[in-house]
């Protein structure tokens, strides 16, 4: 990216955050990713070569440090203090969009596989069941996918192939609707009431399921959007 030379702190910030990928890479660090494959899993539309190049650039900029690993094992990355300081800025970018520029997902934005990965990332360990629990997810409509969320020792793992466990809770719903819920644009209770999602299993698990995940990252922006209505009105 060509450098825009101007002696201004805002211009300096744009040099860091003014591309498509750097804010999204910081988002992945913010939700717990540290290994290269983890980061790439959260950014499936970014090529691995581009991700590698961008991480090296962020290292040179002093935003990321790569920690070595034993031979044959991948290294891990973590944010430096300067990188950590960008976390709230990136989340506020999301809140701004939630207030002014966000809408229902387009067809090309519906992605059931990414949704399942986001569920795994958004899981709140303290809210997950203590006992082993297997959730079967059947995401329908545009971008539909099937997968399993396995909970063990308050840790969630997403599986694209049947892990062979007994299913404790089955969930079926439109990918589009569940994406809206996970980012905080639609309450889970509304989806249930309108028949957009079905839960099959013990009522205690069905009631608890939506509480296992953090869906309020952009609550501030969505709340303000409700107050002033659509842009231009």
Image: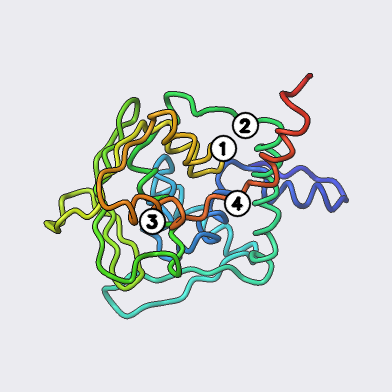
The secondary element bearing badge 1 is classed as loop
Q: Nearer the viewer, mark 1 or mark 3?
A: 1
The secondary element bearing badge 3 is classed as helix
Whether tag 1 and tag 3 are in contact, CB under 8 A, the answer is no
Which residue in the protein does label 2 denote? Answer: 102
Whether tag 1 and tag 2 are in contact, CB under 8 A, the answer is yes
The secondary element bearing badge 2 is classed as loop
From this view, report whether residue 107 is shown above or below residue 163.
Answer: above
Whether tag 4 and tag 3 are in contact, CB under 8 A, the answer is no
Q: Residue at x 68, y 44 (%)?
A: 95
Residue 154 at x, y percent in the picture: 36, 70
Q: Residue at x 30, y 60 (%)?
A: 157
Pointer 1 local density, CA inside 10 Å: few below 14, some 14–19, many at least 20: many
Q: Is residue 160 left or right of residue 220?
A: left
**Front position in the image: 114 or 204:** 204
Which of disc 3 and disc 2 is earlier in sequence? 2
Q: Nearer the viewer, mark 1 or mark 2?
A: 1
The answer for how far apart the CA atoms under marks 4 and 3 are is: 15 Å
From this view, report whether residue 159 is shown above or below residue 185.
Answer: below
The answer for how far apart the CA atoms under marks 1 and 2 are is: 9 Å
Residue 231 at x, y percent in the picture: 74, 23
Which residue in the protein does label 3 denote? Answer: 120
Residue 126 at x, y percent in the picture: 45, 70
Which of disc 1 and disc 4 is earlier in sequence? 1
Which residue in the protein does label 1 denote? Answer: 185
**Front position in the image: 60 or 51:** 51
Which of disc 3 and disc 1 is earlier in sequence? 3
Disc assigned to residue 217: 4
The answer for how far apart the CA atoms under marks 2 and 4 are is: 14 Å
Q: Is residue 39 left or right of residue 150?
A: right
The secondary element bearing badge 4 is classed as loop
- Residue 115 quadrant: top left
């Amino acid at each position: 990216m060509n450098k825009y030379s101007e002696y201004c702190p805002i211009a300096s910030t744009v040099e860091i955050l003014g591309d498509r990928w750097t804010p999204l890479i910081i988002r992945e660090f913010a939700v717990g990713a540290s290994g290269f494959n983890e980061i790439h899993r959260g950014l499936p539309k970014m090529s691995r070569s581009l991700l590698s190049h961008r991480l090296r650039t962020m290292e040179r900029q002093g935003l990321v440090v790569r920690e070595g690993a034993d031979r044959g094992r991948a290294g891990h990355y973590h944010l430096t203090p300067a990188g950590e300081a960008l976390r709230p800025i990136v989340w506020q970018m999301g809140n701004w969009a939630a207030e002014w520029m966000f809408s229902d997902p387009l067809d090309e934005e519906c992605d059931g596989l990414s949704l399942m990965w986001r569920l795994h990332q958004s899981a709140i360990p303290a809210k997950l069941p203590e006992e082993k629990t297997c959730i079967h997810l059947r995401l329908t409509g545009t971008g539909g996918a099937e997968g399993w969320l396995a909970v063990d020792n308050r840790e969630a793992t997403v599986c694209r192939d049947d892990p062979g466990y007994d299913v404790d809770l089955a969930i079926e719903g439109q990918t589009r609707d569940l994406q809206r819920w996970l980012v905080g644009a639609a309450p889970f209770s509304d989806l249930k009431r309108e028949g957009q999602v079905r839960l099959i299993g013990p009522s205690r698990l069905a009631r608890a399921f939506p509480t296992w995940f953090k869906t309020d990252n952009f609550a501030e922006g969505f709340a303000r959007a409700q107050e002033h209505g659509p842009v231009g009105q």
